[in-house]
Image (spheres, rainbow, N blue to C red):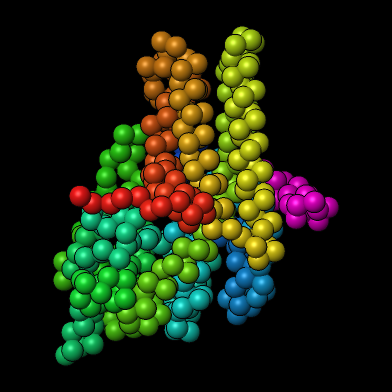
Amino acid sequence: MSALDSPAARAFRAEVRAFIAEHGPRIPVRAGFRSPDDADEDRLLRDWRATMYAAGYLGAEWPPEFGGVGQGDPVHDLILAEELSAADLPPLGDQTHLAAFALLRFGTPEQQRAHLPGIRDGRDTWCQLFSEPEAGSDLGALRTRARRDEATGEWVVDGQKVWSSNAEWSDYGFLIARTGPQEARHKVITAFVVDMRAPGIDLRPIREITGSSDFSEVFFDDVRLPADAVLGTVDDGWRVTMESLGAERSGIGAGAARLRRMLAELSVLAGDDPVERRRIGALAARVEVCNQLAVARFDRELAGAERVADIPIGKLAYSELNLELAEYGVRLQGARSLLVAGDEGAVDGGRWQDEYLYARTYTVAGGASEIMRNVIAERALGMPREARGA
C-alpha cells in the first residue's frame, strides 16, 4: 500500500480538503503558474500563504523559534500540493517557498531573523533570479556578474535575468551571479539575497501569448548589495541553487490531481457522443498512468530508492498529456474555439483557450521535453549520447 493511501494519510487529506474549502481565496481560475492580476489579488495570495503557515500546513519543518516544529512530513506536503492543485489554487513550489528553504539551509542567523518572519506572515514575496537569455537550462553559462568593492565590502551586480516568475510583485530575489572567470562555469557562482527595490534594478514585465505578464526581465546596472547579502559562501552558489531546487520536488505529484480535474471537465464538455466517449476513456487511462508514476516515484523517494529516470519520466508524461488535454478541450468546441475570455458565448469563459495557450510552457519549463528524453535515454537506458555540434 502506498504511503498516500494509509488511514492517517486519508484522514489528513480530508482535513486539508475541508480547510481549503473554508479558507481558500476566491481567485479566477487560470492555467499554470500565474502571477496576480492586480494588487488586490496579490494581497489575497499573501494572506492565504500566511493562513497556511499559521495553520501548520506550511513550515512545519522550520525551527521552533521561527514558528515550526522542526520536522515536516513529506506525505503531508504531497497531499497538500495535490489538494491545492485540485482546488485550482496556486502550487506550493513557488519561489517564496524555494527561498525559505535556501534561507533555512544556507542563511546566516541574521538573514533568517531578517527574512523568515516576513515570509511566514505574508509580508514578503520572493522571486528567483536564475535564468538568462543565454543561460536557461545551462546555468553554468550565466553571465550576470557580481564583483566586490574592496573599499566598502559591497557587491556590485551587472547583468540581465529573464523568465523571472512573479518578479513584478516580489519584495526580494534569490539571485545567482558569476564571481569568477567565465571559463570556470558553475565553480565560481555565488548566491545572493536581493532587495528588489534596490537602485539600479530595472524590471520589465513580459507580455505573453495568454495576455498576462507572469514573467519579467530584470536588468542590473551597478546594483550594490551589502557585504552580508551572500547566501551560503562565496563561489558556492551552485550547491545552494541545486539543493534549493531539489526542495521543489515535494509537489511533483500535484500535476496528476490537476489532470484528473481537467479530464472530469472535458468529460462534461464531450457529452454523450460515442466517439468522444472512447477518446475520454483513452485519456482517462493515461491520466491514471501519470498518477501511478507520481505515486511510485514518491514511495521510492521515501524508501531512499529513487531512480535517475523517475523525475524526467514523470515530468515528460505530465507535460505532454497536459498539452493534449488542452488541445482536446479547444477542438471539442468546433467553431466556438475562436472565442476567448471576454467574448460573448465563450465556452467555460474561454478556459480551454487559456489552457491551450499556456500548455506549451510545461513542455519547456523545468527542462524541455527533448532534454527529458535525452536524460531518460542516456542516464537510465544507457544509450549512446546524442551527437552535439557540427
Residue located farthest toward the bottom when viewing the structure as drawn: 151
Is 3 left or right of 77, judged from the image as shown?
right
Is 81 left or right of 379, judged from the image as shown?
right
The foreground one among 390 and 170 is: 390
Q: Position of residue 88 (x, y in %)?
A: 56, 40
Q: Is residue 14 above or below residue 247?
A: above
Q: Is residue 27 above or below residue 351?
A: below
Magenta stretch containing residue 250, yes or no?
A: no
Q: Is residue 143 above or below residue 162?
A: below
Which residues lie in the magenta part? Answer: 1-23
The foreground one among 97 and 307 is: 307
Residue 133: quarter of image:
bottom left
Residue 253 appears in the figure: yes
Is 302 left or right of 141, judged from the image as shown?
right
Magenta stretch containing residue 10, yes or no?
A: yes
Residue located farthest toward the right when viewing the structure as drawn: 7
Which secondary structure dominates the residues rendered in magenta?
helix
Residue 203 appears in the figure: no
Q: Position of residue 103 (x, y in %)?
A: 47, 74
The foreground one among 173 and 282 is: 282
Residue 155: quarter of image:
bottom left
Residue at image location 44% in from the left, 59% down from the top? 95
Q: Position of residue 101 (x, y in %)?
A: 51, 69
Residue at image location 45% in from the left, 25% down from the top? 327
Is 319 left or right of 203, judged from the image as shown?
right
Residue located farthest toward the front when viewing the structure as drawn: 384
Residue at image location 70% in from the left, 46% down from the top? 17
Q: Position of residue 59 (x, y in %)?
A: 60, 66
Label total for image: 0
Residue at image location 45% in from the left, 79% down from the top? 107
Q: Is residue 280 above or below residue 123?
A: above
The foreground one among 305 and 182 is: 305
